[in-house]
Amino acid sequence: VQLQASGGGLVQPGGSLRLSCAASIADFSTYVMGWYRQVPGKPRGLVASIATDWTTNYLDSVKGRFTIHKDNTKQMVYLQMDSLKSEDTAVYYCNRIPEIEWGQGTLVTVSS
């Protein structure tokens, strides 16, 4: 099992980033997949999820700005982040739900 997030970086407020997650998970298409984020001193929290029927859910603070989607064939999960704000700064991770061992996250820094 391996979860590898990538695509983070430094972006100005109002900018965009697209995160990618390569998920080597058996029966990938049968799981809800999620993007999480964590800032120092706070617990990791769910930001967005996509179900097996492609239903999506978002944290209220990112609704209308973030979009999650996936490619079952490639076992990839993506998070398109637009209109980024400083409070979106965090390390972002992907995982299935229920979660398994965490992989490497990717740091997103929103700053001018």
Image (cartoon, helix red, strand yellow):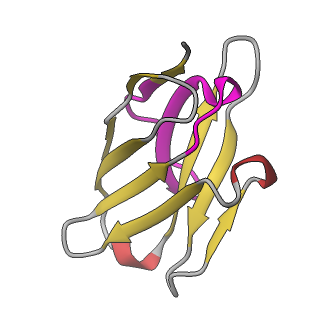
Residue 108: horizontal and vertical position, in percent? 48, 25
Name above or below for residue 43 compared with residue 59: above
Answer whether residue 102 is visible to the viewer in this image: yes
Q: Nearer the viewer, residue 99 or 75?
A: 75
Name above or below for residue 15 compared with residue 32: above
Name above or below for residue 31 compared with residue 3: below
Q: Residue furthest right?
A: 60
The residue sitting at 48% across, 71% down in the picture is 31
Residue 2 figure quarter: top left
The residue sitting at 63% across, 27% down in the picture is 38
Residue 105: horizontal and vertical position, in percent? 42, 29
Q: Quadrant of the C terminus?
A: top right
Is 36 situated left or right of 31 in this image? right
Residue bounds of the magenta highlight: 83-107
Residue 26 figure quarter: bottom left
The residue sitting at 67% across, 12% down in the picture is 40
Name above or below for residue 36 compared with residue 24: above
Is 83 situated left or right of 1 in this image? right
